[in-house]
Amino acid sequence: MAEENQNTPLAPPGIYQRSDEESATTTMKPGGSRHKKSNKCVVYFLAAVVVQSAFMLIFASIVFRVTKPDVKLRSVEIKDLQSGTPQSPSLNMTMLAEVTVQNKNFGRFEYYNSVVSVWFGNVTISDRSIDGGRVKSRKTNVIDVAVAVRADGQLLSESDRNISTDFSKELVQLSIGAELRGKVHVMKILKKSIRAQLMNCTMNLNLTSKAIQDLLCR
Ligand SMILES: *[C@@H]1O[C@H](CO)[C@@H](O)[C@H](O)[C@H]1NC(C)=O
Ligand SMILES: *[C@@H]1O[C@H](CO)[C@@H](O)[C@H](O)[C@H]1NC(C)=O
Ligand SMILES: *[C@@H]1O[C@H](CO)[C@@H](O)[C@H](O)[C@H]1NC(C)=O
Ligand SMILES: *[C@@H]1O[C@H](CO)[C@@H](O)[C@H](O)[C@H]1NC(C)=O
Ligand SMILES: *[C@@H]1O[C@H](CO)[C@@H](O)[C@H](O)[C@H]1NC(C)=O
């Protein structure tokens, strides 16, 4: 074809026309099927490219989609509880919290140091730091946190909750929360900063049984 094109400017108009007819007729005959074959090849090739691209897109959208790891409070146990009286309320205890961090990403989740807080109403009665760490790809870590609570009557009375009422009922409502900040690393390519799900739970400390009940997390 390239040679023909090079020759055409030199050829007289008549021959030029004929060669055009020739090429038209030749494409109808044996060259035609060759043309169709190569057309088919092109179609197959393009289809393969499209299918492969679709697979790569699906693969990438699964692997590179970064979701917030799930931070959950599995249980809270109370150790060494010493509580005051409704007239002179105070709390002295250790709360053993079991926190799980579920990483659904196809890459590790590295979290920084953070803080677990315990509140009585709007007053923070304890802060406990958690060391940073990492959760492997599609794994769940369990973090055990021992939170020491030393709250005297003065501190408890600063709350918007009435501590005398809670003590009379022998049921003190507390809340606990933490937020993990960190980074999800996918295949050394993608690094995404993440504020993991805020854990925010309320519970009742039963002063009679010296145990936690009605643990409710949002
Ligand atoms: C709290 O309890 C611990 C032992 O469980 C005790 O050593 C500490 O003195 C207590 N603190 C207060 C303020 O009662
Ligand atoms: C808690 O609420 C009470 C009453 O609404 C308010 O007087 C107090 O300042 C609050 N304390 C904090 C730490 O927000
Ligand atoms: C708490 O409730 C008791 C009655 O249960 C009441 O006498 C007291 O004044 C209340 N205290 C506050 C700070 O609201
Ligand atoms: C926890 O959730 C309650 C609502 O259920 C909200 O009032 C409170 O501010 C939350 N605590 C934190 C630390 O986000
Ligand atoms: C607190 O615990 C005691 C002993 O287990 C139980 O009898 C009582 O019903 C509990 N209080 C509440 C309000 O559930």
Image (cartoon, rainbow, N blue to C red):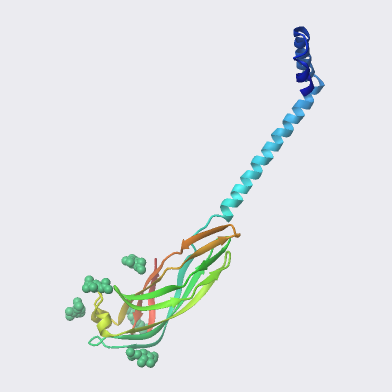
Residue in the image at 77% along x and 20% along y: 6
Count of marks overlaid on the render: 0
Image quarter of the N terminus: top right
Furthest residue toward front? 10
> In the displayed structure, would residue 43 be above or below residue 135?
above
Rendered location of residue 117, percent (x, y):
38, 75
Q: Classify residue 50 by image quadrant.
A: top right
Image quarter of the C terminus: bottom left
Answer with left or right where residue 143 lies relative to residue 34.
left
Q: Quadrant of ligand 3?
A: bottom left
Could you tell me if residue 208 is visible in this image? Answer: no
Rendered location of residue 24, percent (x, y):
75, 16
Residue in the image at 65% along x and 42% along y: 51
Q: Classify residue 136 by image quadrant.
A: bottom right
Residue in the image at 24% along x and 88% along y: 88
> In the displayed structure, would residue 97 be above or below residue 7?
below
> In the displayed structure, would residue 87 be above or below residue 32?
below
Could you tell me if residue 164 is visible in this image? Answer: yes
Rendered location of residue 138, percent (x, y):
57, 64
